[in-house]
Amino acid sequence: MFSTEFVKPYSPPKAPPAPGVPSDVPGWSNQFGHLLHDMMTGDDGVDLDLVAYQQWGKTEFDPIWRDELLRVVQQGQRFEPTQHERFHILNLGMVGEWAGHAYTTEGQDRHYRITSMQSALGITALAISSLQERHFRQSADQPHKVELEERSKMVGILNEFDTALALLEVQRRNPEVTFVLPAPPAFEAAKDDQHNADFIVASDEHVFGVQVKSSNSRKAIGKYDPSRIVIVDTDIDFDNVRIDKRSSDKPRHRPEILSWGGTLCADYVARMRGPNHPALMEMEVDPGLALRMKFVAKQLLVGSKPNLNRIVTRLEDRILPRLRGEYHAVEIPGVRIPTPAEYAASLAAIRTEAKEA
């Protein structure tokens, strides 16, 4: 779908672009929303200072949301970032995509830019993954509904991190993918929620949205517009699940299958080559901390076997035909919803593997 057609259901942020450099979370979100809308319509883009944005993220936003993580851990508060905060947590690791025009589309610069973003995403996700693991271990005595609500927000954002990393890998391997952008709130909360997108993917001619779901939210999948939105089900497409054997200690309870995010990012960090990895050096990560992060990542991966190549192949099957203008609602469905039989077979296979473990 051409960008001018794709953008029609989306309105630019209600607040006009602020003059100068924004100073707050919604202000920056609005700037990116206006910029993306202008990119799609061909209008003159807003004057967005990415250097100032990165500086704001490093000195103001990053310390604030990391303090929130600490309060969640130390004081038992709930992890509830706002929609604007979620956008920036992800977007600050993908700023290179907004500045992509400053790099060549082939060769070392492009490869380095993408791998640097993947490394940044992996490192940021690791902090949330550690919180997810800690929450899981401490929540055995919580009512199931309460525990699920608290964990679902962590799982949701971690699934978005995993999807971002995988989409960037699709881009790295396929030069025809010109950009993968986290969707600003104006696109993630469209006028009609059938057009909501978590990511925007484009070639030189075509563009579409990606919506990230886990199997816990499969009931909502059918509402999305298949001509504009591709669904990624992280439970099935990424195998982002974990077996919860705690319930099996109770009479008449079987192990439960839980949606579990962040495994792909943890695997990426665990595979980084030493503390002198270029991305780690660019981010000024202390060598000792880099080794510690790799150790933590490996611990979080116990029992998980993410396969990036397999995930990328699954995404390419849905993404590349659309970017080549080959999408047809019947021949090449953009939304691949497993049948009840396929879904049941997938869960049965996971249960069998759990029993044999």
Image (spheres, grey):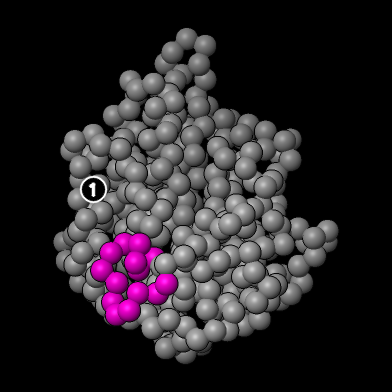
Q: Relative to 168, does residue 346 appear above or below in the rendering?
A: above
Q: Relative to 337, does residue 10 appear above or below in the rendering?
A: below
Q: Considering the image in quadrants, where does the N terminus appear?
A: bottom right
Secondary structure mainly formed by the magenta segment: loop
Magenta-drawn segment: 16-29
**Is residue 115 visible in the rendered structure shown here?**
no
**Does the magenta run of residues contain 321?**
no
Tell me where residue 310 sits by quadrant.
bottom right
Q: Nearer the viewer, residue 270 or 238?
A: 238
Residue of label 1: 68
Please provide percent x and percent y for residue 235: 55, 44
Please provide percent x and percent y for residue 206: 66, 76
**Is residue 220 visible in the rendered structure shown here?**
yes
Residue at the image point whose x is 45% and y is 42% from the top? 260
Mark 1, Cα crowd under 10 Å, few <14 / some 14-19 / many 20+, is: some
Question: How many numbered marks appear?
Answer: 1
Tell me where residue 348 sits by quadrant.
top right
Q: Identify the residue at the far right of this view.
A: 330
Residue at the image point whose x is 25% and y is 62% from the top? 61
Position of 270 compared to 235: left or right? left
Residue at the image point whose x is 71% and y is 57% from the top? 226
Please provide percent x and percent y for residue 216: 55, 37
Please provide percent x and percent y for residue 199: 52, 63
Q: Identify the residue at the far top of this view.
A: 251
Q: Nearer the viewer, residue 19 or 108?
A: 19
Q: Nearer the viewer, residue 293 or 302?
A: 293
Please name the amino acid that badge 1 sits on. Glu
